[in-house]
Image: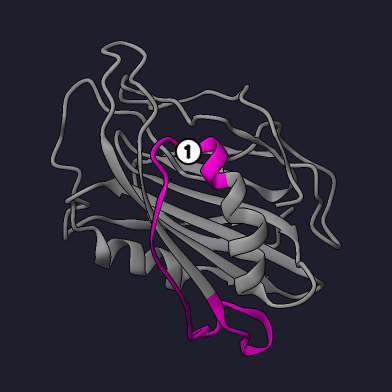
Amino acid sequence: MNQNFQPNHLFRSTRGLAFVLAAALALTVSACGGASPSASGAAHPAGQPTAAEVSPAGDVPDNAVFVNYQNAEGGYTIQYVEGWTVTPGSSGAVAITDIDSAELVEIRALPPGDLTQYATNTDEPQLQSQVTDYKRTDLKTMAANNQAANNQAIVELTYSSTSAPDPVTNKTRAVISQRYYIPGPNNRLAVLTLTTPNGVDNVDAFRQMLESFSWQ
């Protein structure tokens, strides 16, 4: 990863329970053709929420309403669950968080060469150094379904980890993250990370988030 990591950002839920995005990312790579930053801050690459003081089921309900988020600087749109907290970051980044789940987007320069090798040789070592109890569980490519530019393949990295401690209770919890590397036009790369508590089935909701991603 050619990014500079700084553990200096804190995001909190509007419901009163804190999210600590451990080792938050200060993005320094601007998206090609992007505008000047409209908000400060950055999204954590690992999408690692804290353990909530109260442990909800964590499921996104079947009747959840999804709304569109548009980021003009990053040049993309994506859907999220209505009621989640939206915290824009610099260089087109955004952190969209609930009590115990997270939807994070970073915009980077598209690396040269094979994207799977970038994920494993460059990005994954940074994750291992910043995420507690990091363990890769899957790595694969998938069809773009119009999310990626020029119908390129998307790389999906799935890993387990332990959340940052809750600032009130100091409790942690096991979480699962799906991290997608989505090539874009003008040599851009979107890194979308979806995180939920281990054992919670948010497959349908996360699929909708992924499939809603669109380059502008």
Give the image location of residue 20, x and y in percent: 44, 26
Give the image location of residue 11, x and y in percent: 49, 27
Q: Residue at x 82, y 56 (%)?
A: 34
Residue in the foreground of this view, choosing between 80 and 110: 110
Give the amino acid type for the residue marked by disc 1 in the picture: Val
Q: Is residue 189 above or below residue 67?
A: below
Specify whether 205 is left or right of 93: left
Residue in the foreground of this view, choosing between 114 and 177: 114
Q: Which residue is mark 1?
A: 131
Q: Quadrant of the C terminus?
A: bottom right
The answer to whether any part of residue 146 appears in the image is: yes
Asked if residue 152 lies in the magenta stretch, the reply is: yes
Q: Is residue 25 above or below residue 146?
A: above
Residue in the foreground of this view, choosing between 71 and 124: 124
Give the image location of residue 188, x and y in percent: 75, 66
Give the image location of residue 202, x and y in percent: 24, 58
Q: Is residue 143 above or below residue 65?
A: below
Q: Residue furthest top?
A: 168
Q: Residue at x 23, y 55 (%)?
A: 64
The answer to whether any part of residue 71 appears in the image is: no
Query: Which segment did they paint magenta?
Result: 127-154
Answer few, some or many: residues within 10 Å of disc 1's Cα (few below 14, many 20 plus, some between 14 and 19). many
Asked if residue 19 lies in the magenta stretch, the reply is: no
Residue in the foreground of this view, choosing between 206 and 23: 23
Residue 40 in which image quadrant: top right
Secondary structure beneath dot 1 equals: loop
Specify whether 62 is left or right of 47: left
